[in-house]
Image: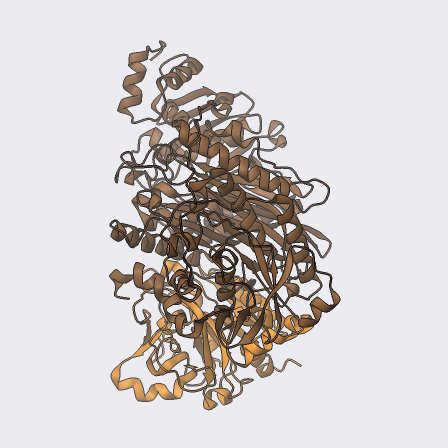
Amino acid sequence: MPRAAVIRFPGSNCEFETARVLKRSGIDSRIYNWNDIDLLSYDRADAYVLPGGFSFQDRIRAGVIASRESIMDLIFEEAVNGKPILGICNGAQVLLESGLVPGWKPGSVQAALAGNLAPGRSGYLSGWVNLKAEPEAISKCPWLCAMTEEPIPVPIAHAEGRFVFREEDIKKVKNHIGLTYCGESGTPADGWPENPNGSTLDIAALMNTEGNVLAMMPHPERCFNLWQVPPGMDGPWGELRRNSSMKDIEEHPGPGAVIFKSLAKYLGVE
Amino acid sequence: MSEIPNRDELRNEVTSRGLAMTIEEAEKLAGYVNRMPTPLEFHLFDTMWSEHCSYKSSKPVLKTLPTDSPGVVIGPGEDAGVVSFCRHDGREWDLVVAHESHNHPSQVLPVEGAATGVGGIVRDVYCMGARVTGSMDLLRFGNPEGSTGETTRGIVRGVVEGIWKYGNALGVPNMGGDTEFHPGYNDNCLVNVVAFGVVPHDRVVHSFVPEEAHKEPYVLILTGKPTDDTGFGGATFASADLDGEQGMGSVQVADPFLKRVLSEANQAVLDMLFEKGIKFGFKDLGAGGIACVTSELAAHGGLGIDVDLDAVPVSIQNLPPEVIACSETQERYGLAVPASVADDVLSVYNEKFELPRLFPHCRAAIIGRFNSKPVYNVVCRGSNAAETPINYITEGVVYEREESPVENNLPEPAERPCDPTADLTKILTSISGCSREHIWSYYDSEVQGATRLRPGEADSCVSVPVEGSRAGLAVSGDGNPWYGELDPFLGGAHAVGEAVRNVVATGATPICATDCLNFGNPEDPKAFWQFKQSVAGIAEACNALGFSGADYPLPIVSGNVSFYNQSTGGKAIPPSPIVAVFGKIHDHRKATDIVLRKEDNLILLVGTRKDELGGSLFYRTCLDYHGGTVPVFRGSLEKRMAEWVLGVVHENRAHSVHDISGGGLAVAGAEMALASKKLGIKFSLDSNPVTLFSETPGYLLEVDPRFVEDTTLPEFVSVAGTVCRGCSVSGNGWSVDLASLRKEWSDKLASVIWREEGV
């Protein structure tokens, strides 16, 4: 069975559910502490996940201190080796701060996740959004390869999720888009709240050039099961949730499962 | 200092140290130690004898609450209550629940006060060995629109910010709660916090040094944040009337990051101790800091202890011994373990989890040794800072307070004009009746990946807390200040009743409850009478609403009393008993929510409407009238209604369920439609204020039309309407288009309270 390593930094808080959904997808997963470097160097894994949370209390900037931890040298090495690497929420912030995504200049920070921009509010925002995968991303990203053109609803929970870039880089960015925020039927996001944080080009997840490293703000591990979908939600997933039998509500995969199913498919899990 | 001091000498000490203890109490203390008490002894006993810690006014009254039921593992007395929850994979799992107030600090410093409120309550659950799987905040604020509105708005924003900044970072999902506004809270907001978690039954940890410490040497390890001077005198601050901004220095400073790392480190330590089969004691540091944790761990295990304050990791040098011992620095725990494993424990904290690298001056350290001499002995910089017979510390004090009834017989209004369309619109767009969504939108209710129903989707939040098990946990907290104000007994009884209904509406059977009793100054006979009335109301409701078979009550397993919720110049708050109820749904797949499912389904009304609109949203919002008869609490009917609803849900025949409370049947129907977005309800009832707006307890149930053909409805159930297409609610001669009202309903709170932020 392929193996995934979930890296816990001080202040991570989504490591358990992330490890759990990987297991449920047929991938053996294990949580490693930030200082289990020797152990992880020895074990290695077929994929790596940096889970959500508030690593190092978001001191200075979200993700910046964790990105300087020694264990990131190992993640860097594995990224270069082409191993699939996923950062969710705070994990995405760590990937951007480490320069792995978008990865134009290894080791140098090329993009940022800035504070949410929403009318009349600041700070944290929890809620559900719709996401759509870019066709090119489906073909080259191991975390998206099982996706279709159909949008999926996924929850967000962050205060700094707005992808921002240098003006001159915007053109290059387009080749790195993994997921965008969109309307319920897949139409481009019509401002807030479909784009919940003012992210540039409605970006919800950004890849490196090769596509093996994905920095994703929404939380697919929180909607792995159909029973986690809100009962009042619009669209086909809401419909499915409301009309599901007791058997289906437990056994039917939730909208976020496709991210982990993608990895399973990529790693050849039957 | 060897002679017994006289009254004047004691009075000088008490005054100059700013203590809350009475002269009689100071004399009692001097008698215990047979000399002038040391500063540390003064502060230690001042804390232990404070209302907050000793329950000296409330203890005799609290004894009247039912606490016993077959599922109760640990009732009131330890840091949290424990009840059995489910069996999974051959293992018994328990539910751990705790409930507290953090009112005074939140009024003075809202962000820090509310944050440390969450921080304190989760520690109580963690220290029973549990993983915390949820928290809930029950908030009471003044009028955000009135003359003091600006202050209140700032407090609301600060409290919400404190809650999200702490809870979200800690990774504990917010499982709702409620928010009420009443001018009686203008000078004293209430921030009640509830936390809960699960633990395997054989891994429940106690907060005292174990038996084994009589046979082999045990040490006390202090872990967590380095001690500073924050929160010095916190318990005393909570036990006096609030006087302006005084007491700011008594508010603690929270650190969710450190708490998160500590929680995992604690779990690793507990895992190690359980694996080795070692007995230990574990307790969090709250009121009274090191002094309380060391003396209580020892005294409750029948031992004495030598504490070395020089061994305490501190972040400020040269603090006086009484500050090191009694400050309420957050994020600390005390652990009583055999000396032989102390090094292993220290290495988990200091090496595996690298506390010293993550936080300046932070580390776990041995600060005390237990012994068989029944003395509490503290040494600091070579001299004795305390030397007291240890049993006196935990013995406590009790007072019999006087009571005097408050007459509040306000008549019914002379006239009750009613225009259902206009009145319902007015209620739904009022500050009391509008959506609380803007508040929840700051809270993370899904971290841990076990959330089944979030705030707003059902009458209570539901989670699936034991991995792999289908057992669902439903939680709700309630308390209506408008009822409490008119009738404190009914305020207490309906707090239980409504929380029970909210849990039942999701298909969960109530298994236990907690309470937080928020009142004015207990030395005022009127406030004390209100307190006694509310406790009697809670007791009556709990005795009527047990679901464990036979005559067992719904047990109160943990709680807190918060007196002195009044400012020195102003009025006391309305009597505010707040109750949380915890329910279990055997198979979470059967859980029901408030979202309407299908056009032409029938809406059943459970609970015949009565003319009892006192304290109702209709009187307050539409008639601007603040009197009348509060709904009667009908215990046996409430229980029969709950059992009937549970039966329908368990047979999978209820498509959606919503309880009837604030705003009555019309508001309950509107809320179901608003949650459904594309469906609504057409009521077939008379359009009078009693039918539409009376808050007589009850439920609305959505069922298939065939249900009424093959089921005999009990006398308290009738058909009230049908589900219709379109987001609206209507009846004979009235109709409210909720699709067009939605924006105002959902934005109202933000537009009033967050207006200073440009909403």
Chain B hue?
Answer: brown
Identify the residue at horizontal 51%, vertical 41% (top origin): B490
Q: Quadrant of residue B178?
A: bottom left
Tell which of B730 and B563 is nearer to you. Answer: B730
Q: Residue at x 40, y 86 (%)?
A: A188
Quarter of the rendering occupied by the C terminus of chain B: bottom left
Residue appearing at x 38%, y 71% in the figure: B743
- In the image, B264: left or right of B143? right
Q: Position of residue B605 (x, y in %)?
A: 60, 60
Quadrant including the N terminus of chain B: top left
Give how far across and how far down residue A10 sits, in percent: 44, 58
Q: Residue furthest front?
A: B414
Check the image and report above or below for A243 versus B53.
Answer: below
Res B481 → quadrant: top left
Q: Position of residue B345 (x, y in %)?
A: 53, 44
Q: Colour of chain A?
A: orange
In the picture provided, is B153 more to the left or to the right than B508? left
Can the viewer see residue B255 in this picture?
no
Residue B747 percent location from the top left of the image: 36, 66
A191 above or below B544? below
Task: Tell me, yes or no, if residue B678 can be seen here.
Answer: yes
Image label count: 0
